[in-house]
Image (cartoon, grey):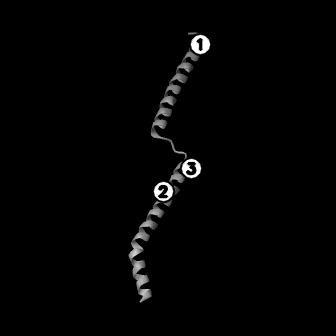
Amino acid sequence: MDREFQLNELLKELPGFAETASEEARNLLKAALGRFIADMDLAYQEEVDTLKQMLLRTEQRVKQLEEALDDIQNGS
């Protein structure tokens, strides 16, 4: 009878154990994914857009300077 009582008590507590294990697994997964993403050295889209704009302006300026240099070399 004592073993049956222990088994019944264990079965009553089993959903709580499962929920705790599930929560712990979720926390471990979130932590691992967080470390993985941090190690990837990702950039925000705003940073990429800003760098694209800076590159475009730089390319335009280089083109202007090249044209000015050509004008100077050609005596215009």
| Residues tagged 3 and 1 counted as in contact (Cβ below 8 A) | no
- Residue identifier under label 1: 72
Specify which label sits upstream in the sequence, 2 or 1. 2
Q: CA distance from mark 3 to mark 1?
A: 50 Å
Q: Amino acid at mark 3?
A: Asp
- Residue identifier under label 2: 30
Specify which label sits upstream in the sequence, 3 or 1. 3
- Indicate the position of residue 56 as horizontal and vertical percent values: 49, 29
The answer to whether residue 40 is above or below residue 5 is above
The foreground one among 49 and 71 is 49
- Indicate the position of residue 39 as horizontal and vertical percent values: 56, 49
Q: Which image quadrant is residue 68 in?
A: top right
Q: CA distance from mark 2 to mark 3?
A: 14 Å
Which residue of the protein is positioned furthest toward the top in this rendering?
76
The local secondary structure at tag 2 comes to: helix
Q: Which corner quadrant holds the N terminus?
A: bottom left
Q: Amino acid at mark 1?
A: Ile
Q: Nearer the viewer, mark 2 or mark 3?
A: 2
- Residue identifier under label 3: 39
| Residues tagged 2 and 1 counted as in contact (Cβ below 8 A) | no
